[in-house]
Image (tube, helix red, strand yellow):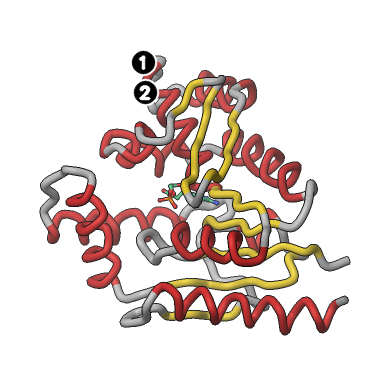
Amino acid sequence: MKQNAIAIDGPAGAGKSTVAGKVADLLGFVYIDTGAMYRAIASKVLDGGIALTDLNQIAELARRVRIRISREQGELRVWADGADVTEKIRNPEVTAAVTSVSQIPAVREAMIGLQRELAAEGSVVVDGRDIGTVVLPEACAKIFLTASVTERAQRRWQEMKEKGYEPDLNVLQQELEERDRQDSEREMSPLIQAKDAVLLDTTGMMINEVVDRIVNIYRNQWSGNA
Ligand code: DC
């Protein structure tokens, strides 16, 4: 049976979280940022001084950590074991560590279980890399959101400048390309477009235009299923 869920997948910097949050607000759905969950695990790994090569300890941590996500007045907040990690999970150290942490099968199993539990509670917008393919294959609307790598790097650069960092645009673009490559080539739930997903290239599009397109796709799909 189809699930009242919108799955938004795509590469880093495609604007998934901004767009997904706005779509959720418009429709009154809960927004689940799965990248933030992997980031929360990576942040706990770094805080605990666990080596990125210690797969057993990381798996153990992923199974017991309590992650909570909420959206208040348009702002996503993330907690890990009761501590607010919202800002911390976006720092460059976590960003550098999260790709390898998210490749560990036991970490993915724990997170996928949690994501499905959260999605089962009601109508949701879920963004990530493997939502339409693995986490919620029955989502009634699936979007594969992308944009040119230069535009994605430019957006990330802007975001980081606003947070007070001094990023180098070329380095950011190389890092994005490397993360895309690793996310796409990993064995377990790689980043790929689901067969039934709509491809949306947002290069040159305004955020609200993208949001409207997704809401329309959802309405068409859901009315076809209801
Ligand atoms: O979307 P993001 O940049 O916050 O994602 C952080 C990392 O987590 C990124 O390296 C890809 C990974 N990720 C994943 O493997 N599967 C998901 N469903 C979401 C994110």
Within 10 Å of the Cα at label 2, are there few (<14), some (14-19), or many (20+) other Cα atoms?
some
Q: Residue at x 57, y 27 (%)?
A: 62
Relative to 163, is 191 on the left or the right?
Answer: right
Relative to 158, is 125 on the left or the right?
Answer: right
- Where residue 86 appears, x then y in whole percent? 42, 35
Q: Are marks 2 and 1 in contact (CB under 8 Å)?
A: yes
Total marks in image: 2
Callout 1 amino acid: Gly
Q: Residue at x 58, y 54 (%)?
A: 189
Q: Is residue 81 above or below residue 131?
A: above
Task: Identify residue for label 1.
Answer: 49
Instruction: Residue 97: name its quadrant.
Output: top left
Indicate the quadrant containing the C terminus: top left, top right, bottom left or bottom right. bottom right
Q: Residue at x 73, y 47 (%)?
A: 116
> Is disc 2 placed on a helix, strand or loop?
helix
Q: CA distance from mark 2 to mark 1?
A: 5 Å
Q: Residue at x 45, y 75 (%)?
A: 208
Callout 2 amino acid: Leu
Q: Is residue 104 above or below residue 55?
A: below
Indicate the quadrant containing the N terminus: top left, top right, bottom left or bottom right. bottom right
Q: Is ligand 1 closer than 8 angstroms to the Cβ of mark 2? A: no
Relative to 30, is 104 on the left or the right?
Answer: left
Task: Identify residue for label 2.
Answer: 46
> Is disc 1 placed on a helix, strand or loop?
loop
- Where residue 105 appears, x then y in whole percent? 58, 39
Within 10 Å of the Cα at label 1, are there few (<14), some (14-19), or many (20+) other Cα atoms?
few
